[in-house]
Image (spheres, grey):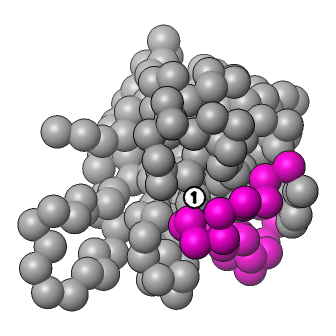
């Protein structure tokens, strides 16, 4: 009973759950089937629509399998953009956005570590929107209460924007992981 959500005061014309490739072999009763939530909203005084795609990749897939899930998201978004609409892709990529940042190097080399998002994994001309001043996610090798000073974090939550959108603000809200293994990321954009 978990999933993605888009909360808005605007009218949502259509909301659809779109499954991502399910890549587990063998029994998988304890593995969630990943999906993306696509919300389409009309734009006032325009024939265009704004599509917001919210998703969470599977953190523990092999890198090439995770790339297949990400490709499914990007291909879907590209089709929406080709209609001359606006598209915001947001969620947990479980891939780091920043090239490198010493603040987020792992002290425990045996802990899970997200790989880097490759330039060719997003459509040509689309832009990334992320904030690396605060970690967006944390390593789950220990309960938060036992992490002490070694809170292992990373920046793997953010947005990919279609070329007809311009980021005006992106900021990670430091909740110190009180409510989740992720901190919320706020985004403001304007139409070009």
Helix, strand or loop status at disc 1 = loop
- Residue 113 relative to residue 140: left or right: right
State whether residue 187 is above or below residue 82: above
State whether residue 144 is above or below residue 114: above
> Can you give x and y, in whole percent of width and height, for residue 59 in the image?
46, 64
Q: Tell me which residue sits at (32%, 60%) in the image.
A: 34
State whether residue 118 is above or below residue 173: below
State whether residue 50 is above or below residue 141: above
Residue 112 painted magenta: yes
Q: Tell me which residue sits at (48%, 12%) in the image.
A: 9
- Dividing the image into 4 quarters, which one contains the C terminus? top right
- Dividing the image into 4 quarters, which one contains the N terminus? top left
Q: Nearer the viewer, residue 161 or 164?
A: 161
What's the magenta region? 103-126
Where is mark 1, residue-wise? Answer: 93
> Can you give x and y, in whole percent of width and height, for residue 30 in the image?
15, 62
Q: Tell me which residue sits at (61%, 67%) in the image.
A: 113
Q: Nearer the viewer, residue 163 or 183?
A: 183
- Residue 158 relative to residue 49: left or right: right
Q: Is residue 84 visible?
A: no
């Amino acid at each position: 009973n978990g999933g993605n959500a888009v909360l808005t005061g605007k009218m949502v014309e259509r909301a659809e759950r779109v499954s991502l490739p399910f890549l587990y072999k063998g029994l998988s009763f304890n593995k969630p089937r990943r999906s993306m939530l696509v919300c389409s909203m009309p734009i006032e005084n325009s024939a265009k629509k704004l599509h917001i795609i919210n998703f969470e990749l599977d953190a523990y897939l092999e890198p090439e399998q995770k790339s297949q899930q990400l490709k499914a998201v990007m291909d879907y978004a590209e089709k929406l953009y080709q209609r001359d609409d606006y598209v915001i892709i947001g969620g947990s990529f479980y891939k780091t956005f920043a090239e490198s940042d010493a603040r987020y190097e792992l002290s425990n080399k045996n802990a899970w570590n997200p790989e880097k998002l490759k330039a060719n994994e997003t459509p040509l001309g689309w832009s990334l929107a992320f904030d690396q001043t605060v970690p967006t996610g944390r390593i789950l090798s220990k309960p938060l209460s036992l992490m002490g000073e070694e809170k292992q974090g990373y920046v793997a939550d953010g947005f990919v924007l279609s070329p007809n959108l311009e980021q005006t603000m992106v900021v990670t809200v430091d909740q110190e992981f009180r409510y989740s293994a992720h901190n919320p990321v706020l985004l403001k954009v304007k139409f070009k």
